[in-house]
Amino acid sequence: MSLQNDLHLKGAVLPVSKRVCVMGVLNVTPDSFSDGGRYRDPAEARDRAFRMAAEGADVIDIGGESSRPGAAGISAEEEISRVLPVIKALKDIKVPLSIDTYKSDVAERALDEGAAMINDITALGDGSMAGIIARHQAGIVLMHMKGEPAHMQDRPEYDDVMEEIKGYLASAVKVAESAGIDPKSIAVDPGIGFGKTLRHNLFILKHLDELKVLGKAILIGVSRKSFIGEITGKGEGERLPGTIAASLFAIMKGAGILRVHDVGAVRDAVTIIRAITES
Ligand code: HH2
């Protein structure tokens, strides 16, 4: 397992240099592909977040808009109305909160309310995002996506998928650092399933270590994703074994943060890998 630098978030540190960290997914949307509609009520969202923290989540990622293939976008106001009450309901949680948004208006309100990191699937596509992150000294996940969620799975093509992802993320890192974001606050993510076929997703996982040249913590999100279903024939609720297998492969290839729905199970699996590698 190759570990990267610790990730510095506003007032918190993810100890990626010492161990693999787990990001628990909390979707407060009506339509997310696997947990849509389950945690829209802030009290339910709170219970879920506290449960994930108790199971060993290092950070909770709150999403107010689904990015599943074909998803239609919502307005910043609508997204704020979903996310903000949940952040407010989690004021006393010990783990830092990340917000899965590409809209700078949502990010600003969330950071004002105490969130520590923005998970941006467009890697600073909104021109105002970098300045807001820098001002708040917050963390940022820069993710690669080809196209937009509405059309990203319409026959994506690459000459060289890893080269394209590396180049894209390297440019995004440069934009982030030029805007004043702390280099230690940036994580990168190749964006499994975002404008990628099954073949692309497998190739990215197999060659994930190539992203180490970027010198940033590597985050990966394979949890319950459709490529696992394509291989195993399993529905969304039955993809935990596939999620664990792909996650463990990713950490052997250098991933430092795993974005997952099933925190307890993945945490246990990571602990076993750690015990073996450190024995
Ligand atoms: N995947 C999803 C959403 N956000 N962010 C990062 N950085 N990396 C990912 O792989 C990633 C992400 C999709 O999963 P989910 O949140 O479960 O579904 P939905 O987008 O439908 O809410």
Image (cartoon, rainbow, N blue to C red):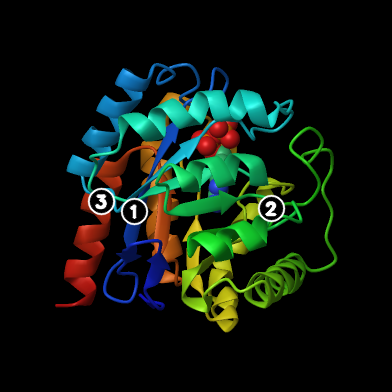
Where does label 1 land, which residue?
22
Residue nearest the viewer, comparing 229 with 76: 76
Q: Quadrant of the C terminus?
A: bottom left
Q: What residue appears at the point 33 percent right and 60 percent down from the top-left corner?
A: 21
Where does label 3 land, which residue?
267
Disc 2 on helix, strand or loop? helix
Residue 235 vertical position relative to residue 146 in the rendered view, above or below = above
Q: Amino acid at mark 1?
A: Val
Residue nearest the viewer, comparing 158 with 123: 123
Residue 7 vertical position relative to residue 43 in the rendered view, above or below = below
Residue nearest the viewer, comparing 267 with 118: 118
Look at the numbered discs 2 and 1 and tell me whether their residues touch, using CB distance below 8 Å.
no
The answer to whether residue 274 is left or right of residue 102 is left
Looking at the image, is mark 3 or mark 1 earlier in the sequence?
1
The alpha-carbon separation of the residues under discs 3 and 1 comes to 7 Å
Where does label 2 land, which residue?
199
Q: Amino acid at mark 3?
A: Arg
Looking at the image, is mark 2 or mark 1 earlier in the sequence?
1
Residue 250 in the image, given as x and y percentages of width and height: 45, 62
